[in-house]
């Protein structure tokens, strides 16, 4: 039965390349403080959240230059399918998901809670994002600053209906799937990298402004060159019915109506076309002989340009008597605004549609002595007659809009204590980007001046409320820190889990 399920999911395996993605950029510091950062992320990370911050010294003790080697790694998964409350209840208690009276029909209860009902057409979705900054460098001068940074990203979205999950839980069980069950899922991945050049300068300086002194306005811009690696999408729709002979607990006949379409390009599309041609000559050829090296598909399939830009107003408010003593005498308030990920990629390298539709009726190969033989023959037939027998055709290229966002933020630095608030919303719903607005609150206290302890929360966006924390060591000339965030209650808008590591960051 596992073999049958693996055959059903073969297209997903084809498109599961090493992938990285992100909407609002974060590093280990900003994730630990709730995922904001518009008014305090500095150094080369500022390229991706607010280039104006290349001019700021966020802790007032940073050296002028920053160098990152694998200088930032982060992963985030969220959506209604990521329901941690349900998974914790059913998968961490030593329970057995069997549909039996003594177990209280645990599998049925779990599926009903996860999907919010018993209808097999109910759907849940998830999006996984990972971000990698292989290299970053920034240099801050007296009046201007510049930086160079690279980033690798992919967006992966996955959507399934309850019927698909039922097959995953029950397998090919005629006791559970004797009625016609819709089994649908969709998948999309976009993989690309970028090279960003940031520039910031002091635009305005006022010795005295309202309640502040030494007020400065910084503006920044970071154009970036985009290199598209892959964009693949799959839409799979089917109905499954399993019949059994009278008095038998095993399947005797399987009826599978299917309709799927895979859109892809580049080397993967070319290999699938080669397989199609070979299959037309010999239907026993194996798909794995043509698409067995996912690493070979990491080639350039698109190019484009993007832009990040922002402004930061920095004010010294030390003259206002706010919490003196151990928090330090200098107090800095920053208010920032940024537009990020403006731009698009055009994927036009041999764009191809792979598709098939039909009705598959299987009652065995005629020599099935036991249920194991029946299911092995079923897997072979599915591979050869259903998923392997497809048609390829040319289609138009794909235009992928970056997950653009508007961000507004403020940070208050009181010596060793930094507090922040951010507000933002996306211009599209790409990946973990969401048009639903978000509010981020964060706090960092630098214990002994070199051990940052961070806490934060995010409300809104693509999931339920998120709580985060982080810690590490930050000697100003060297940093190694991590951050983690999870949802508090993911029943309403879905769950979210995120983690980030600073990598090796040197400052001099």
Image: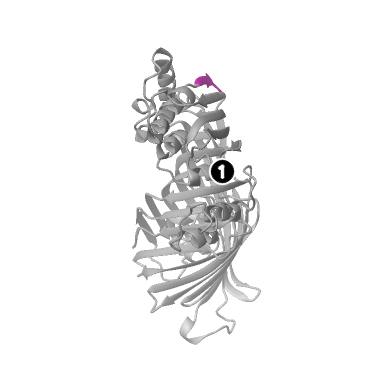
Q: Which is more toward the observer, 263 or 29?
A: 263
The residue lying at 37 percent from left, 30 percent from top is: 369
Q: In this picture, which residue range is highlighted in magenta? A: 391-395
What secondary structure characterizes most of the magenta part? strand
Quadrant into which the N terminus falls: top left
Residue wearing tag 1: 159
Q: Which is more toward the observer, 282 or 466?
A: 282
Q: Which is more toward the observer, 468 or 85?
A: 85
The residue lying at 63 percent from left, 59 percent from top is: 492
77 drawn magenta: no
Residue ranking furthest to the top: 281
Taking 2 as reference, is 91 above or below it?
below
Q: Which is more toward the observer, 474 or 360?
A: 360
Image label count: 1
Counting from the top left corner in percent of width and height, residue 457 is at 56, 66
Residue ranking furthest to the bottom: 325
Residue ranking furthest to the front: 247
404 left or right of 500?
A: right
Quadrant into which the C terminus falls: bottom left
Taking 429 as reference, is 236 above or below it?
above
Mark 1, Cα crowd under 10 Å, few <14 / some 14-19 / many 20+, is some
- Whether residue 205 is visible to the viewer of this picture, yes or no, is no
Colouring used for the render: one colour
Counting from the top left corner in percent of width and height, residue 93 is at 45, 63
Counting from the top left corner in percent of width and height, residue 45 is at 45, 56
- Whether residue 174 is visible to the viewer of this picture, yes or no, is yes
Answer with the quarter of the image where residue 359 lies. Answer: top right
392 drawn magenta: yes
Counting from the top left corner in percent of width and height, residue 250 is at 47, 37
Taking 457 as reference, is 162 above or below it?
above
């Amino acid at each position: 039965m596992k073999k049958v399920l693996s055959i059903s999911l073969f297209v997903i395996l084809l498109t599961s390349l090493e992938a990285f993605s992100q909407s609002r950029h974060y590093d280990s510091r900003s994730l630990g403080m709730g995922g904001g950062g518009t008014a305090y992320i500095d150094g080369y990370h500022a390229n991706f959240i607010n280039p104006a911050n290349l001019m700021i010294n966020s802790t007032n003790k940073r050296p002028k230059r920053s160098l990152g080697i694998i200088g930032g790694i982060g992963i985030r998964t969220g959506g209604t399918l990521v329901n941690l409350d349900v998974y914790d209840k059913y998968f961490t208690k030593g329970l057995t998901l069997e549909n039996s009276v003594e177990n209280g029909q645990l599998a049925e209860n779990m599926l009903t809670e996860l999907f919010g009902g018993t209808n097999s057409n109910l759907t849940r979705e998830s999006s996984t994002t990972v971000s990698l900054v292989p290299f970053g460098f920034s240099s801050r001068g007296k009046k201007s600053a510049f930086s160079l940074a690279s980033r690798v990203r992919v967006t992966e979205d996955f959507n399934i209906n309850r019927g698909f999950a039922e097959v995953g839980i029950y397998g090919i069980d005629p006791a559970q799937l004797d009625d016609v069950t819709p089994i649908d899922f969709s998948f999309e991945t976009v993989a690309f990298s970028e090279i960003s050049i940031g520039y910031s300068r002091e635009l305005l300086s006022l010795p005295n402004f309202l309640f502040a002194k030494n007020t400065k306005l910084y503006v920044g811009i970071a154009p970036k060159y985009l290199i598209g690696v892959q964009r693949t999408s799959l839409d799979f729709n089917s109905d499954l019915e399993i019949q059994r002979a009278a008095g038998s607990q095993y399947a005797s006949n399987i009826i599978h109506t299917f309709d799927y379409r895979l859109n892809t390009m580049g080397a993967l599309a070319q290999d699938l076309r080669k397989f199609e041609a070979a299959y037309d000559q010999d239907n026993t050829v194996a798909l794995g002989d043509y698409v067995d090296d996912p690493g070979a598909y990491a080639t350039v399939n698109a190019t484009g340009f993007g832009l990040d830009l922002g402004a930061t107003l920095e004010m010294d408010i030390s003259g206002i008597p706010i919490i003196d003593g151990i928090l330090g005498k200098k107090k800095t308030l920053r208010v920032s605004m940024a537009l990020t990920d403006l731009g698009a990629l055009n994927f036009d390298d041999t764009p191809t549609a792979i598709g098939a539709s039909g009705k598959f009726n299987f009652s065995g190969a005629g020599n099935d002595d036991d249920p194991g033989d029946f299911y092995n023959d079923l897997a072979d037939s599915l591979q050869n007659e259903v998923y392997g027998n497809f048609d390829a055709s040319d289609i138009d290229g794909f235009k992928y809009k970056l997950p653009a966002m508007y961000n507004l933020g403020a940070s208050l630095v009181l010596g060793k204590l930094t507090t922040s608030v951010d507000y933002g919303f996306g211009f599209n719903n790409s990946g973990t980007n969401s048009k639903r607005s978000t509010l981020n609150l964060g706090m960092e206290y630098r214990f002994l001046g070199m051990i940052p302890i961070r806490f934060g929360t995010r409300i809104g966006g693509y999931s339920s409320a998120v709580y985060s924390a982080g810690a590490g060591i930050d000697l100003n000339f060297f940093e190694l820190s991590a951050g983690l965030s999870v949802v508090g209650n993911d029943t309403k808008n879905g769950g979210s889990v995120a983690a980030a590591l600073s990598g090796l960051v040197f400052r001099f």
